[in-house]
Image: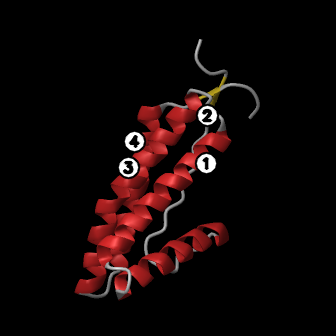
């Protein structure tokens, strides 16, 4: 799509919440142990961050912010969140190593179109040609 586009932020949030709820429900059905269920519960909580990020990114597109600036800022925020979590887990703990490994695996899974390592959700958002009047 070329030229200005507009993203309906309410529709994006509604669709992201629906997609997340559907994904979580499917994961709950596949969960085979209490530990699996706990994992799904925690991911459901943390997916609030992904929904918020999806909406914020679409809002930045509505404002026509340079994607290179957005990518750099998002990378900094994700890096900061990851580093803080890493420190909170303790840099020598197994949890810290799992955080780093799981981040890489989730990223690679989305690039491959698979979800072998927990709940991995990809969100696509289509803009409306023309932008705001």
Image check: 113 left or right of 116?
right
Q: Could you tell which of marks 4 and 2 lies nearer the N-terminus? A: 4
Q: Could you tell which of marks 1 and 2 lies nearer the N-terminus? A: 1
Image quadrant holding the N terminus, namely: top right
| Residue annotated with mark 2 | 127
Pointer 4 and pointer 1: residues touching (CB < 8 Å)? Answer: no
User: Looking at the picture, how far across and down is residue 17, in whole percent?
Assistant: 38, 49
Q: Could you tell which of marks 3 and 1 lies nearer the N-terminus? A: 3
Q: Is disc 3 placed on a helix, strand or loop?
A: helix
| Residue annotated with mark 3 | 17
Q: Is disc 4 placed on a helix, strand or loop?
A: helix
Image check: 41 left or right of 23?
left
Pointer 3 and pointer 4: residues touching (CB < 8 Å)? Answer: yes
Q: Is disc 1 placed on a helix, strand or loop?
A: helix
Is residue 22 placed above or below 93 in the rendered structure? above
Instruction: Say which residue appears at 63% left-offset and 69% top-offset.
Output: 113
Using a 10 Å C-alpha cutoff, classify the residue at mark 1 as few (fewer than 14 neighbours), some (14 to 19) or many (20 or more). Answer: few
| Residue annotated with mark 4 | 14
Instruction: Say which residue appears at 38% left-offset and 80% top-offset.
Output: 91
| Residue 71 circle label | 1
Inter-mark Cα distance, 4 to 2: 15 Å
User: Looking at the picture, how far across and down is residue 51, in whole percent?
Assistant: 41, 49
Nearer the viewer's eye, disc 1 or disc 2?
Answer: 1
């Amino acid at each position: 799509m070329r030229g200005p586009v507009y993203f309906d932020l309410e529709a994006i949030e509604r669709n992201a919440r629906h997609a997340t709820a559907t994904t979580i429900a499917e994961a709950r059905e596949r969960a085979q142990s209490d530990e699996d269920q706990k994992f799904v519960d925690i991911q459901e909580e943390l997916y609030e961050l992904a929904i918020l990020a999806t909406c914020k990114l679409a809002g930045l597109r509505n404002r026509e912010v340079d994607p290179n600036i957005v990518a750099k800022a998002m990378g900094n925020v994700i890096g900061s969140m990851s580093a803080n979590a890493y420190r909170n887990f303790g840099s020598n703990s197994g949890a810290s190593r799992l955080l780093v490994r799981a981040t890489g695996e989730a990223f690679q899974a989305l690039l491959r179109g698979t979800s072998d390592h927990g709940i991995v959700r990809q969100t696509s958002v289509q803009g409306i040609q023309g932008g705001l009047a």
